[in-house]
Image (tube, coloured by chain):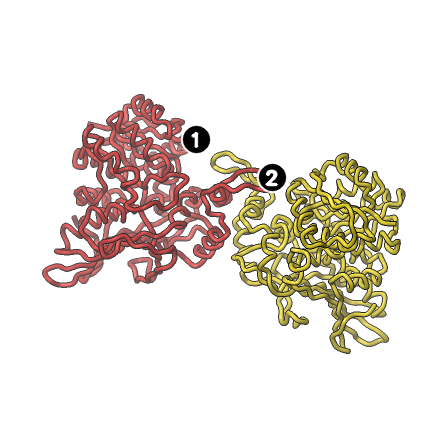
Chain colours: A yellow, B red
Amino acid sequence: MKKNVLIVGAGGVAQVVAHKCAQHNDVLGDIHIASRTLDKCQQIVDSVREKGSLKVAGELQAHALDALDVEATKALIDKTQSQLVINVGSAFINMSVLQACIETGAAYLDTAIHEDPDKICENPPWYANYEWKRKAVCAEKGVTAILGVGFDPGVVNAYAALAVNDYFDSVDAIDIIDINAGSHGKYFATNFDPEINFREFTGRVWSWQNSQWTQNSMFEVKRTDDLPVVGTQTSYMTGHDELHSLSQNLKVPNIRFWMGFGEHYINVFTVLKNLGLLSEQPVRTAEGLEVVPLKVVKAVLPDPSSLAPNYSGKTCIGDLVKGKKGGVDKEVFIYNVADHAEAYQEVGSQGISYTAGVPPVAAAILIANGSWDVQKMVNVEELDPKPFIKLLNEMGLPTRIRDDQGDRALDV
Amino acid sequence: MKKNVLIVGAGGVAQVVAHKCAQHNDVLGDIHIASRTLDKCQQIVDSVREKGSLKVAGELQAHALDALDVEATKALIDKTQSQLVINVGSAFINMSVLQACIETGAAYLDTAIHEDPDKICENPPWYANYEWKRKAVCAEKGVTAILGVGFDPGVVNAYAALAVNDYFDSVDAIDIIDINAGSHGKYFATNFDPEINFREFTGRVWSWQNSQWTQNSMFEVKRTDDLPVVGTQTSYMTGHDELHSLSQNLKVPNIRFWMGFGEHYINVFTVLKNLGLLSEQPVRTAEGLEVVPLKVVKAVLPDPSSLAPNYSGKTCIGDLVKGKKGGVDKEVFIYNVADHAEAYQEVGSQGISYTAGVPPVAAAILIANGSWDVQKMVNVEELDPKPFIKLLNEMGLPTRIRDDQGDRALDV
């Protein structure tokens, strides 16, 4: 039976989600897009129609919604008879959208962890501060909620589960490496919402090492890897959502996240941070206006979705897993390479949005076809990774593996 | 006869002006300090009393004033019977304070050119856009108005006049060099109002070369000099007020201004400028708040007056003048060196504020004693530089000269 989808959010990732839902609307049914700004939803609808992305004739509608308003969100879910809600809006709305799903019975999917606007980098594990407090009620009501099912978190959690389940007897370390070797041609820009982007890096860096939480500061620890396609790349230990579930769900003593940054990004970030311009706390101008500096930085930076038409180059994101198999040391790198220009060609968004937007649609299809319709709240590593990876191979995010037998497409 | 002084403004320079007026209140009479924020004026009053700066018993009062309100300013001039108004407030209030002086007959002094908040770097000569439009009415009413009588503009204009009048038959070039070799110990700070500081550098760089206006961009042209006390220093061609009067009043084909910047300052400035955070034009945040980025940058930076207690090191500002005397090439450097810690010790402000705040008080004394009471509007180079330089030698800003006969105190 087809299941209608409500997409919450209207940024670059929502654009990808809408196109991919349209490409699979024979399985998914009606598609509704809702955000504060109706215009932005309508632009996505127009883009889907222009590219002819709808596989079969079907509903495709834009809606204005304040997703912090649980009653309004419930009403829209009811009105649109949506059974799947893909939340790719701001990180501040997770809990209200989740609540609307719990109360209506719709399945809930998101791609990033909930954040309180006034708090940066809370205590680990982050999921326990918000989402996991609804685990019991989801199980009780039989509501399927799949948390963090973008690329990272999301696909990298599936890669971790696959490695732990199938490739090793014991895993010592999972290093998730996220490299964007693309170029947007601007002086400076972030690839998604600058507010969320910078908030990732202004707090402490939590990592899971020797089976405990470890603190570092941003840009304190780095590594250099020779990676497929993108070549030699430097990345920095960074706090990231997936560490906060993988550390609790897998028996792996070392789980770290590494993000690639160029010197220019680090310089701009360092200047802004040291001046206090990345603060989420309001300051008062000489004229008496209260304003959050980070929101002003966001206002002057390029809209991430505006980068797509001129974005060139590729991303490489994957899990470098080390452990033992048959008493012997083993190392595998399970990864995907995405191309910015190809993504723009297909769905009108750049590669970062593409890698984040395709996986929740794959997950929605897996809920619709029953294989992931678990009727409780889970993180991705708790699910069978194989149907997900298999479907992503078909949907534009092929998985590859590099190990001592070489570099090849991953057949699951 | 003693003349009462109204000081408009309550920043670091106003603090110096108040202390220096107090030290000479046997000549100047009552002292009144007015700005939007009464508290800041009162703090200056308290500081003057704490340091016992009043030479003789006399009035010293704080007032709240919106100096954009001409009628309110006139009323305060009348009420306080002020005959001298030293405007060291924001660069946006010059024309309204000047108007109040013209209508009351009080003498007007300022230290920086008028600016329209919405305009950056207007066409040269800048004085012709605002102040000089009041030249005729000042002459007609016999109102003394001395424009730009801080250090630069101000003292450097007097140095230029002295060189042209007394040391050369013909002058080919005046290069005004402003080096702050001090350290405030902060990650980043500006030495005076960040808004005014950055506005100096975000537009085109106007210079007077080959007897015509020449345009460059900021940090495009630099020079390196071995200077007295501060040693080898790199400075950058910068647009500055004094070029806009010196070029019109002196027959010198090349007049340039050079300001010293460290690489760190340039990096921070470049990042902020390229991101659009130094813009004086409002942007709109995602939440719909209209805000001027530059005012937010100002809000997060340290208050310049907070730097004074820990400021160490020295400034060196002077005129490098090249020309001919008796048919022979000649070069002189006329300059002052000020010490941040000594300035703080004496008047509670750092050296930059000290060099800007002492000269208008010297000029006020010269008006009070008649030698500069010219009853018209002038720039400093139109006045006899000798009594000014002589008085500054006594007031804490001694002038020195370096030429082929060595480096020595300048005796005028």
| Amino acid type assigned to the residue bearing label 1 in the image | Thr
Q: Is residue A395 visible?
A: yes
x, y percentage for residue A291? 55, 39
Q: Quadrant of the N terminus of chain B?
A: top left
Which residue bears the numbered disc 2? B287
Residue at x-position 67% and y-position 62%: A178
Q: Nearer the viewer, residue B365 or A49?
A: A49
Left or right: A343 as drawn, with respect to A149: left
* Element on which disc 1 rests: loop
Q: Is residue B126 above or below residue B263?
A: above
x, y percentage for residue B400? 23, 53
| Amino acid type assigned to the residue bearing label 2 in the image | Glu
* Label 2 or label 1, whichever comes before in sequence order: 1
Q: Nearer the viewer, residue B239 or A253?
A: B239
Whether residues under marks 2 and 1 lie with C-beta atoms below 8 angstroms apart, the answer is no
Left or right: B294 as drawn, with respect to A21: left
x, y percentage for residue B345? 37, 43
Question: Would you call the spot at circle 2 few (<14 residues within 10 Å), some (14-19), or many (20 or more)?
Answer: few
Mark on residue B202? none
Q: Which mark is in front, 2 or 1? A: 2
Left or right: B256 as drawn, with respect to A92: left
Q: Nearer the viewer, residue B345 or A85?
A: A85
Residue at x-position 64% and y-position 69%: A230
Which residue bears the numbered disc 1? B37
Residue at x-position 22% and y-position 31%: B137
Distance between the alpha carbons at the discs numbered 2 and 1: 30 Å
Left or right: A372 as drawn, with respect to B234: right
